[in-house]
Amino acid sequence: MLRLIRTHSAHPDFVSLVQQLDQDLAERDGKEHDFYAQFNTLTAIQHVVVAYEEGVAVACGAMKELDKNTMEIKRMFTTPAHRAKGIASLVLGQLETWAKESGYTVCRLETGKRQPEAIAVYQKNGYVQIPNYGQYAGIENSVCFEKKLL
């Protein structure tokens, strides 16, 4: 049975999952990894969702405020053995619900072009591609998405 919890960025299961995520991204992004890593510090993140299956942490996601109306989705990860089961969509949905409950009307995110499975999850969940924003403007490997929360 899958269980989702809302927590914070210092939660040990979230930290462990993010370490796995960073290893994966370092392999995919190569030399570009350090550029992206500077925007993903855990100290800036206060809203975290961790998914558990049979008591084991298998996926996570987080969000941080971009402005008074917009949350940015960050640190989405599902362990390889648990991919393609819809868990990422459940984590993303929980983050969106939390954002709405907190008064936000938009979720944005950035992902890498070398992460086609992530792009597919976001598109499946109603995110539309937008011009690269903020620090990602002009970055060739980045692709940005947005979803209006109803």
Image: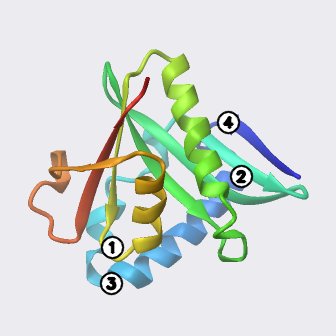
- Give the foreground label among 3 and 2: 3
What percent of the width, then of the height, locates residue 70? 33, 28
The quarter of the picture where the C terminus appears is top left
- Closer to the camera, 16 or 143? 143
Q: Label for residue 33?
A: 1
Q: Which mark is residue 30?
A: 3
Query: For the point 32% across and 21% down, which residue is it?
Result: 69
Residue 7: which numbered mark, if any?
Answer: 4
The label number, if any, that marks residue 12 in the structure image: 2
Give how far apart the Cα atoms at labels 3 and 2 are: 26 Å
Q: Amino acid at mark 2?
A: Pro
Q: In terms of secondary structure, where does tag 1 sit?
A: helix
For the residues labelled 2 and 4, the Cα–Cα distance comes to 10 Å
> Disc 3 or 2, which lies upstream in sequence?
2
Q: CA distance from mark 1 to mark 3?
A: 6 Å
Q: Is residue 78 left or right of residue 22?
A: right
Quick one: label 2 or label 4, which is nearer the N terminus? 4
